[in-house]
Image (tube, rainbow, N blue to C red):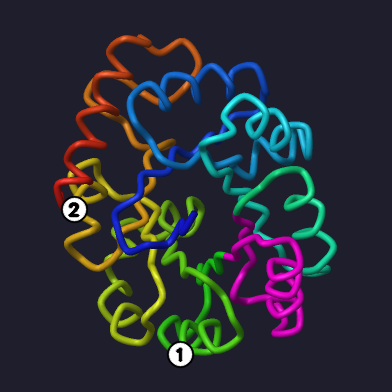
């Protein structure tokens, strides 16, 4: 299966700290038509490899993205997640070049894919070119939670055009986008679209206790919009 075939993909971010809640939310998202399941950083910190294994076991047809945000030990961390069933791992662009290359080496060995997050890098287009040359499979143009709350108004849209012009590999843009902006990402050259916290979707939120039927309907509509090009 070619996971990066150029067609828009919708990834649900499971930024929860409890595996049961994450699985329940994943069930809603899968019924709504999402393509990929992200074991978010909070979930990995709370549940570790068990979260990736559980998602892989229950949803064998939905690739799992392990949002490790790896900064060191690139091969080891990637290897652990690939062995647990992850299809993708995330390494940070501000990490050492060898860390990135080692994550890529693990990907080649275990038939996995590597995303690189350019959050906080001083030259996002420049590092994106290097990441592509080092064998990374996709770039995440990310404005972090603390960053955008410290400096209101920051957005991945600030960097997206320049990064898109710098590389040919697929892009994902996340962090502070509205639901309308996120749905329109394929038209901006970033076809790997994420829905999840902290995106508030009308009166429904991707969190425990949400109205399941309403959340499923809203995610389904979002998936339809993304697949139609925004």
Residue 35, horizontal then vertical, whole percent: 41, 40
Q: Residue at x 66, y 35 (%)?
A: 43
Q: Height in image: 72 above or below 177?
A: below
Give the image quarter of residue 40. Answer: top right
Residue linked to disc 1: 126
Q: Height in image: 90 above or below 170?
A: above
- On whether residue 96 falls in the magenta region, the answer is yes
Callout 1: SS = helix
Residue linked to disc 2: 184
Callout 2: SS = loop
Residue 65, horizontal then vertical, whole percent: 57, 48
Residue sitting at the far front:
1
Residue 105, horizontal then vertical, whole percent: 74, 75
Choose between 135 and 172: the one closer to the eye: 135
- On whether residue 55 falls in the magenta region, the answer is no
Left or right: residue 39 versus residue 105 is: left
Left or right: residue 157 versus residue 229 is: right
How far apart marks 2 and 1 lie (CA) works out to: 25 Å
Q: Which mark is residue 100?
A: none
Left or right: residue 75 versus residue 157 is: right
For the magenta stretch, what is the residue range? 88-114
């Amino acid at each position: 299966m070619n996971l990066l075939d150029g067609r828009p993909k919708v990834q649900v971010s499971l930024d929860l700290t409890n595996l049961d809640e994450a699985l329940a939310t994943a069930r809603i998202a899968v019924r709504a038509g999402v393509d990929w399941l992200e074991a978010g950083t909070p979930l990995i910190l709370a549940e570790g490899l068990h979260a990736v294994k559980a998602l892989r076991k229950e949803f064998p047809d939905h690739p799992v993205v392990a949002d490790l945000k790896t900064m060191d030990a690139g091969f080891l961390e990637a290897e652990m997640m690939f062995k647990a069933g992850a299809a993708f791992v995330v390494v940070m662009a501000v990490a050492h070049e060898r860390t990135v290359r080692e994550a890529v080496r693990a990907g080649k060995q275990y038939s996995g894919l590597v995303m690189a997050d350019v959050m906080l890098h001083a030259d996002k287009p420049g590092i994106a070119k290097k990441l592509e040359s080092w064998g990374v499979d996709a770039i995440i143009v990310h404005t972090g939670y603390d960053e955008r709350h410290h400096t209101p108004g920051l957005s991945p849209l600030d960097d997206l055009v320049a990064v898109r012009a710098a590389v040919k590999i697929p892009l994902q843009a996340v962090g502070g986008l509205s639901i309308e902006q996120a749905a329109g990402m394929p038209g901006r050259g970033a076809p790997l679209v994420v829905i999840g916290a902290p995106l508030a979707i009308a009166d429904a939120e991707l969190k425990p206790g949400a109205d399941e039927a309403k959340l499923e309907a809203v995610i389904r509509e979002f998936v339809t919009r993304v697949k139609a090009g925004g």
